[in-house]
Image (cartoon, grey):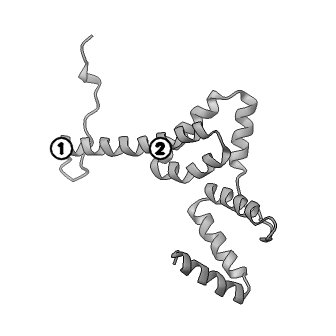
Amino acid sequence: MAYDDSKATPPERNGDEQGTWKSVGAVSQQLAGDLARRKDAAKAILCCLIEDDREAWLAASPTLSRKLTEQELASVAWAALRAMPGEAAFDTAKSALECGWEFLPPLDPEDKAEVLSTARMWAAGASQNELMAAAVVAVEGMAPRSRTSFAGWLKKKGLV
């Protein structure tokens, strides 16, 4: 069967007033970039499937949100939910949608690792606006002495 190019989509327009077409090289570069970022996302998903661990999926969330468009993320989520039995799909979607503000207990030397793990899980699913709001409110709520100590720790870690 011969290739039918009548159904092929033309290259995108540059967007200038003349409506000129992008060069083949520009289209190829765009496709190569799309392929590279999707390949990175696919590697992250594969690693999570191999690891088969909730922590791995939470850690992959920021990578997936950087590498995939909102439409691509929605497509992956839709396909995954459609592949699941009804009750499991509902529970999974509900769990993902309920991922919101969870107030953390104060850091205690006994369970510091668990509290930080919970905070990291929340942060992995939070938007940039939620992260900034949480950081501002947390710093504002600190005692002046703790705030100074925290600022020193941030500087020591090279985060500011």
**Residue 134 position in % (x across, y down):** 66, 70
The quadrant in which the N terminus is found is top left
Q: Which residue is mark 1?
A: 23
Q: Is residue 64 left or right of residue 113?
A: left
Q: Residue at x 68, y 46 (%)?
A: 96
From mark 1 to mark 2, how far is it between C-alphas? Answer: 28 Å
Which one is in front in this view, the residue at disc 1 or the one at disc 2? 2
Circle 1: element type: loop
Q: Residue at x 66, y 60 (%)?
A: 120
| Label whose residue precedes the other's in the sequence (1 or 2) | 1
Q: Nearer the viewer, residue 72 or 43?
A: 43
Residue type of the residue flagged with mark 2: Ala
In which quadrant of the rendered view does residue 109 lie?
bottom right
Q: Nearer the viewer, residue 151 or 6?
A: 151
Q: Residue at x 68, y 81 (%)?
A: 140
Does residue 22 sit above or below 106 in this rendering?
above
Q: Is residue 36 left or right of residue 91?
A: left
Numbered disc total = 2
In which quadrant of the rendered view does residue 110 lie?
bottom right
Does residue 138 sit above or below 101 in this rendering?
below
Q: Which residue is mark 2?
A: 41
Residue type of the residue flagged with mark 1: Ser
